[in-house]
Amino acid sequence: MKQLFRLLVIGLVGAFLLSGCAKAPTVEMNDTKASVESATNADTQTYAKDALAKLTSDLEAANTEVQTQDKKFLFKNFDKAKQMLAAVKTDAEAVKAEAAKKKEEAKQAAIAAQGEAKAAIDAANALLAEAPTGKETKQDIEAFKADLTGLTDSLTGLQQSIDQEKYADASANAAAIKEKAANISAQITAALEKVKAKRGGRK
């Protein structure tokens, strides 16, 4: 009986020593924090905002788990914390990849919008070139030319936005330019129809 009691005590002492000696995953925590810091930049804050917020939340949860286990006097177990930290570290790379993908998509969308804006200006200029000149149309034509020149000049600013990676701004401005150019085309068409109607009435 004494032998059994002695073995039981030895077993409990061993369990105490093993659980008490469990060390917090400091290295893993530092590596994971570094990964999250690396993933926290202008691109991820712009193109993967929700994923980045979740990443930060998951890191905090992992840190809480580490602290919870570290405060225990007996039976410390950092396995769950290590798993959580490993998942956060993996997700940090995924967040960067997501941001890079969405950024490229935004870039291509801005470039496409830029092309559409230029095409709308070209179409308006082509339509204006076909307009008959004369006293009746001179004033309108000059006004249209001035408007289209202004829109053409605005394409320079559009390119600058793209070069500066301000893709959302570039897309929005391109859409506005396209709309204005289309409106000018509609006005030119309406003006031409009036001229034709007047000339037809005179005949």
Image (cartoon, rainbow, N blue to C red):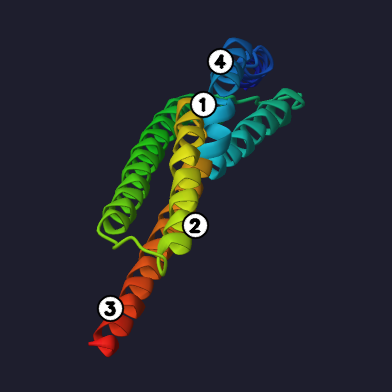
Mark 4 vs mark 3, foreground winner is 3
Q: Which residue in the structure is indicated by mark 1?
A: 164
**Reading the chain from its start, which is encountered first: label 2 or label 3?**
2
Q: In this view, does 96 lie above or below 170?
A: above
Q: Residue 143 carries which label?
A: 2
User: What whole-number distance in Å separates the C-alpha atoms at marks 2 and 4?
Assistant: 68 Å
Is 97 placed left or right of 77 in the picture? left
Q: Which of marks 4 and 3 is nearer the N terminus?
A: 4
> Answer yes or no: do the residues labelled 2 and 3 have beta carbons within 8 Å?
no
Q: Which of the 4 image quarters holds residue 31?
A: top right
Report the Cα–Cα distance between label 4 and label 3: 79 Å
Q: Quadrant of the N terminus?
A: top right
Residue 36 in picture, x, y percent from top left: 57, 24
Estimate the spatial distance between the alpha carbons at disc 1 and disc 3, rounded to whole Å: 47 Å
Amino acid type assigned to the residue bearing label 2 in the image: Ala
Q: Where is residue 149 in the image (x, y as percent from the top left)?
A: 46, 44
Which residue is identified by label 4? 28
- Give the number of the disc on residue 196: 3
Precedes in sequence: disc 1 or disc 3: 1
Q: What element carries label 2?
A: helix
